[in-house]
Image: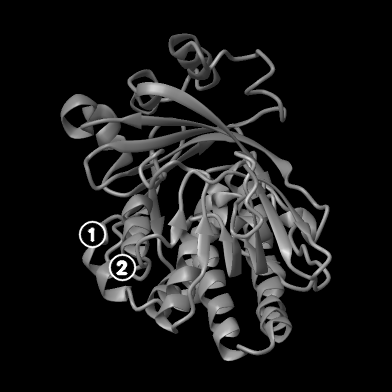
Amino acid sequence: MTDTRTHHPIAVIGAGLGGLTLARVLHLNGVEAAVYDLDASPTARPQGGMLDMHEDSGQAALRAAGLHDEFRAAIHAGGEAMRILDKNATVRMEDAGENESRPEISRATLRDILLGSLPEGTVRWGAKVTGARTAGDGRHEVTLADGRTFTADVLIGADGAWSKVRPLVTDTTPVYAGISFVEMHLLDADTRHPRGAAVVGGGILFALAEEKGLLGHRDPDGSLHVYAALRTPADWAVSGAVDFTDTEAARRSLLDHFDGWDESLRSLIGEADGELVARPIHALPPGLRWKRVPGVTLLGDAAHLMSPFAGEGANLAMLDGAELATALVAHPDDTEKALAVYEEALFPRSERSATESAANLSICFAPDAPQSLVDLMNQYRDEVN
């Protein structure tokens, strides 16, 4: 059924951290936005692991949203601890993470805080967007998978890597970054997986060598969230080279890639609970810009998808949301001015982070890793001191 009567002054596609931050800051200022999300409910799928919230981006956004106290009450104390290991599980660098300048929080917990701060009904769940177009009257029409449509004066794409709104402003699409992750979980690690728990430690693990790695962190519930990272062809996960529908076959194949690595590290693969999920890493070109399209803009991964090696994705998405809301509130009678102000800051900020992320990916999987990462961390420390 098509319902062309539904119209919103502001519509946000995507109820991720960026879209929710935008809706929250608007709400605080008496402006309501309609948020559409493809998930059937807030709990329809796992929300990922831990996030470190940066003072000048994620935490700044939480302050703008009036939620910094709730965030501080929910952080994972000690989650900033970090270990860098080689393939023999030799510790090459360790940081206890005691300064808590970038406290860790579960992505799911953070999303719940944001959702709980919005009026009931703000998010329209089970609304998968299949396309968007600019209508003749200057409005923008969005089509959903069930055939419904709605229009908006201001349409904001907060819908991630494969955004359906992005084509309204640019034909640029994400490209494969050369690295594929395989995601794994080890539950109740201290009791059931003591070797893995010991090698990961209390926070974040980087075990790197031979242009590949095992990256992990400890979740507040005592589980380990681990990624095996490999340089593979773009279609590796779907080409038949590894059958991820057969967990044990995928596990054996993955263990072959880490032949000769210390058994404590291999145990993160060998003892993983549940399925192994392939996640190829994609990125938009650093420095992506688009010409001002009336009434449309992007935020978060839709605007500047990057690899996770600068730790900026969620932080920037939330800052984008807060700054876009602030601009819209500051220019209530001139949407184009608001969007131009927002994008003027967005473009250089995201270019810096995307460039850093691409460089850090190369550093993590350089032939001399983990020394290359140790050198980078020492450089960061020198800059702080």
* Residue 251 against residue 360 in the figure, above or below: above
Quadrant where the N terminus sits is top right
Along the line of sight, which residue is nearer the eye, 90 or 155? 155
* Residue 137 against residue 262 in the figure, above or below: below
Look at the image and tell me whether residue 267 can be seen.
Answer: yes
Residue in the picture at 51% in, 35% down? 213
Along the line of sight, which residue is nearer the eye, 272 or 323? 323
Q: According to the image, label 2 marks what residue?
A: 100
- Distance from Cα at disc 1 to Cα at disc 2: 8 Å
Residue in the picture at 48% in, 77% down? 26
Quadrant where the C terminus sits is bottom left
Residue in the picture at 77% in, 62% down? 288
Q: According to the image, label 1 marks what residue?
A: 77
Looking at the image, tell me whether mark 1 or mark 2 is earlier in sequence order. 1
Along the line of sight, which residue is nearer the eye, 266 or 310? 310
- Residue 326: x %, y % from top left: 54, 83
Tell me the SS state at disc 1.
loop
Residue type beneath disc 2: Glu
